């Protein structure tokens, strides 16, 4: 059988100066996308997973160095057992299937979130993917899996308190710079732009501390319909925003 070559994607408009360095995405709307098609919710999750590579590969073209995606929240365990088990199996399959192409593209993958509740097989795959891509620098992809902003701050505070109890940290020296060092994201810059798909205008416990000064884009597109062109357009419009960080433009 002759394999038809994948049509080459049109080049994206060149990265505008002042574009976002770190984009975080709340990939929402998979369930509704599937329901609209009369299919089970997991069909939407599979379609959603396929969009990730396209967005990752667009990053260098639009000047994005860090991409952080929300894959599963600490609250998502409330869903049916079928959906949760299906998602966990999808994550295992996704990692197994994508490791090679992510690595070849120069993607460094990191996971944030609490791994304790995840199954051993998934944890092993996550560790292996992090190790296999640790030398890459082209795109820093962070996958938030069993992640919740409040949970992250609580876990960070616990470790910080332990350092105080053990005499390694003086409470007098605790300031705004201290807590981020204990967060899962300690090696990442703060997100510049947070995108949420599916028309919901809420952050659902995502990167609470880190997004204090992020710009937000809430767009109607359901995640499985999100394209690299839309991603590029959002990054381009970010370049035109006036981020004042509480100051006054001079
Ligand atoms: C986002 O899509 C993916 C996860 C939360 C895992 P949803 O599953 O929340 O889709 P909707 O919001 O129900 O459409
Ligand atoms: C946020 O979406 C979590 C992820 C995208 C993984 P949800 O669909 O879980 O958020 P809510 O329930 O609408 O706030
Ligand atoms: Mg949702």
Image (cartoon, rainbow, N blue to C red):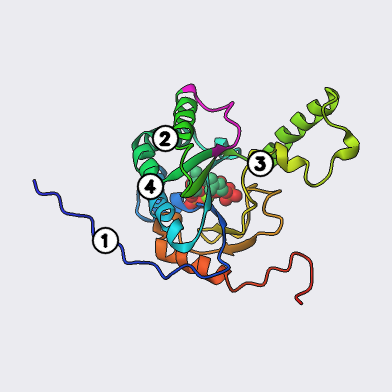
- Rendering coords of residue 81 (x, y %): 48, 32
Tell me how far mark 4 sits from mark 2, CA to CA.
27 Å
Dot 4 or dot 2, earlier in sequence: 2
Residue depth check, mark 2 versus mark 3: number of the one nearer the observer:
3
Dot 1 or dot 4, earlier in sequence: 1
Query: Residue at the location (23% across, 60% down)?
Result: 7
Tell me how far mark 4 sits from mark 3, CA to CA.
24 Å
Q: Which residue is mark 2?
A: 86
Dot 3 or dot 1, earlier in sequence: 1
Tell me how far mark 2 sits from mark 3, CA to CA.
30 Å
Tell me how far mark 1 sits from mark 4, CA to CA.
16 Å
Q: Is residue 97 above or below residue 106?
A: above
How many residues crowd around disc 4 within 10 Å: few (fewer than 14), some, or many (20 or more)? some
Q: Which residue is mark 4?
A: 105
Horizontal side of 186 relative to 19 (left or right) equals right
Region in magenta: 111-120
């Amino acid at each position: 059988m002759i394999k038809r070559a994948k049509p080459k994607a049109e080049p994206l408009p060149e990265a505008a100066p002042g574009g976002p360095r770190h984009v975080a995405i709340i990939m929402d709307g998979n369930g509704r996308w599937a329901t609209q098609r009369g299919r089970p919710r997991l069909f939407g999750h599979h379609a959603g997973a396929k969009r990730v590579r396209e967005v990752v590969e667009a990053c260098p073209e639009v000047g994005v160095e860090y991409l952080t995606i929300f894959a599963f929240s600490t609250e998502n365990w409330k869903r049916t057992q079928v959906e949760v088990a299906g998602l966990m199996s999808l994550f295992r399959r996704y990692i197994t299937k994508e490791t090679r192409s992510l690595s070849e593209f120069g993607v460094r993958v990191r996971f944030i979130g609490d791994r304790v509740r995840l199954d051993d097989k998934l944890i092993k795959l996550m560790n292996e993917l992090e190790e296999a891509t640790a030398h890459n620098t082209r795109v820093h992809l962070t996958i938030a899996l069993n992640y919740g902003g409040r949970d992250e701050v609580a876990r960070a505070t616990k470790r910080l308190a332990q350092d105080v109890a053990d005499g390694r940290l003086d409470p007098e020296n605790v300031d705004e710079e201290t807590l981020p060092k204990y967060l899962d994201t300690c090696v990442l810059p703060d997100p510049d732009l947070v995108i949420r798909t599916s028309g919901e205008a809420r952050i659902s416990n995502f990167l609470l501390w880190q997004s204090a000064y992020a710009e937000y884009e809430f767009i109607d597109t359901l995640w499985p319909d999100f394209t690299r062109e839309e991603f590029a357009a959002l990054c381009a419009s970010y370049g035109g925003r006036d981020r004042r960080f509480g100051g006054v433009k001079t």
